[in-house]
Image (cartoon, helix red, strand yellow):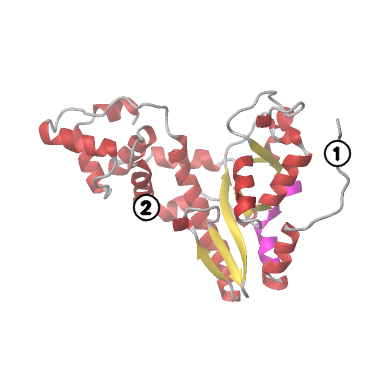
Amino acid sequence: MDLEHIQRLSARSIVDTLDSLGITEGWAIGDELRAAAMSDPDVPALPEPNRGRNQAFQNLVVGTIAERVFREQHLAPLEADGFTVVDYHEAGENRDYGLQRDGQELPINVKVASTLFRNAKTTVGLEPEDCVPISAYKAIGASERVPTLVYVDLVDFTLRDKVDAFMDALEGDLEIGWYLFSWYGGVGAKRTQDRYIDVLFDAHEDELKALAPGSTSFRVISAQRVLAILRSLPRRVPGLGVPGAGTGTFVAEVNVHVSVEAETRPWGEVANECRHQGIPHVLAQITRRVMAEIPDPRL
């Protein structure tokens, strides 16, 4: 199915799909389709999309796989050791989860690196398979609000293609919804997209989670270390446009590129430290300070 196929569907058939997915009033385009279905149910009524394909919506599937696999396979086992796992998704903040014990918390943001940066070697000096991006702006914001935040990054450069193939093979209302929400946003779209993701995972959760790799692919780096890399290795941040940092121009998307092997650690190692040495031991590594000489030009 493609955009042209979606646009040929009648208003009534799309409204039936929305109803089947449990999507009610509140999405502007859906409300327009419901109005059109009342007067001309058999006539196509979708407008031209006002933007390209919504990659952010499509990334919701990959992100949800990572979050659910990490919660169920890598956080849940820690509960038997006296840890509490707090879910912060409804709070809409930097943390996805908080791992707590003895009044201490390790705040966690789950991410996915599923797209290979093929020009990494020439642009940021890392091999493509050893390079993952983290938003500089998000790291700065996180370090201000949650100073000890860690990113747990699912690193699998085949996951994007596997998920796309799975979604392209869907049929019926889930197939229509996938393409519909990939092209159409507007007022109320976020709640609509979240509802679609819930229905998708209710129907296919086990199959989707099976696309994720093993535990060693979850890698950990703190927001503080990301910022340290930003300060000390400007070449790793080509979006800043600083000399020697790649583009030479400022762009809206500014990522810090980190080495998977040298600058992140396997989640299993961090989890074992939490178990045996306690959360404060891990937090101390994040807040560690050393004396250093820094440039202090007067002119």
Q: Which mark is residue 153?
A: none
Report the quarter where the N terminus lies.
top left
Residue at image coords 52%, 65%: 86
Q: Is residue 247 visible?
A: yes
Q: Residue under label 2, please give it.
A: 198
Q: Quadrant of the C terminus?
A: top right
In the displayed structure image, the side of residue 177 where residue 112 appears, left or right = right
- Whether residue 217 is visible here, answered yes or no, is no
Q: Tag 1: Cα neighbours inside 10 Å, few (<14), some, or many (≥20)?
A: few
**Where does the image place residue 23, in percent across and percent down from the top left?**
27, 47
Front position in the image: 141 or 99: 141
Seen from the viewer's position, the closer of residues 223 and 126 is 223
| Residue 267 magenta | yes
Q: Amino acid at mark 1?
A: Asp
Q: Secondary structure at mark 2?
A: helix
Classify mark 1: helix, strand or loop: loop
Rendering quarter of residue 289: bottom right
| Residue 171 vertical placement versus 289 (above, below) | above
- Judge whether 279 appears above or below 124 on screen: below
Q: Quadrant of residue 9?
A: top left
Q: Which residue is mark 1?
A: 296
Residue at 70% x, 68% y is 280
- Where residue 262 appears, x then y in whole percent? 76, 47
Q: Amino acid at mark 2?
A: Asp
Going from N to C along the chain, the mark reached first, 2 or 1, is 2
Q: Nearer the viewer, residue 53 or 269?
A: 53
In the image, residue 230 above or below residue 78: above
Count of numbered circles in the view = 2
State the extent of the magenta-drawn residues as a range.
260-273
